[in-house]
Image (cartoon, helix red, strand yellow):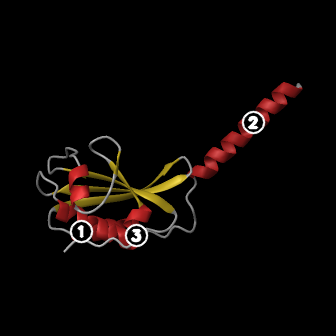
Amino acid sequence: MNRLAQVAFGVVAVITLATLSACAPSASVTVDHEELATAVQDSSPDIADAIVQDGTDGTARYLFVEIDLVGEELDSATVAATMAVVAEEIPDEYTSVEFVARTADGERIAVEEPLRAAGLDPLMMGRLRASILTDALRGYTAPA
């Protein structure tokens, strides 16, 4: 094998190892996704179901939270109740919470206005998905 091929092979090996280690779950994360999903669902009578999953964006970890509504509209009280539950449970290893809401018919709906009305400042990822930094969620409580 010539020198150029050896260097190329080494670079590919390092990139592959770095990529795989970035996607590997951290042993220190202790979120029980089913338990948190149940707590989110129980936080508001307007939530029919909730899904909580891990996600990665490069080396950053996020918690994906999706709520399925009983009706067609998402209000700030439902968002506030959801985020208050998530804020209590999210470990330090996560950098953000990705949030999605669906109507009873399964259609994604806009989340920015209800998040802002609940006192949160989301980073929008299109109209239908928001990212909330965990630092902004720490200590969050639903407005009275």
Choose top left, top right, bottom left or bottom right for residue 44.
Answer: bottom left
Q: Which residue is mark 2?
A: 11
Callout 1 touching callout 3 (CB < 8 Å): no
Under circle 3, the secondary element is loop
Q: Amino acid at mark 1?
A: Ala
Q: Amino acid at mark 3?
A: Arg
Mark earlier in primary sequence (1, 2): 2
Q: Which residue is mark 1?
A: 81
Tell us which disc is closer to us: 1 or 3: 3
Under circle 2, the secondary element is helix
Residue 38 seen in render: no
How crowded is the residue under tag 2: few (<14 C-alpha within 10 Å), some, or many (20+)?
few
Percent from the top left, x then y, of residue 14? 73, 42
Percent from the top left, x then y, of residue 60? 52, 53
90 is higher (above) or lower (below) than 131: below
What distance separates the C-alpha of mark 1 from that of mark 3?
14 Å
What distance separates the C-alpha of mark 2 from that of mark 3?
40 Å
76 is higher (above) or lower (below) than 128: below
Q: Which residue is mark 3?
A: 138
The extreme left residue here reads 71
Which quarter of the rendered picture does the N terminus lie within?
top right
Percent from the top left, x then y, of residue 46? 15, 63
Residue 79 seen in render: yes
Tell whether 107 sits left or right of 120: left
Q: Amino acid at mark 2?
A: Val
Tell us which disc is closer to us: 1 or 2: 1
State the count of labels: 3
Tell us which disc is closer to us: 2 or 3: 3
Mark earlier in primary sequence (2, 3): 2
Residue under the image location 67 percent in, 41 percent down: 16
Residue under the image location 77 percent in, 33 percent down: 9
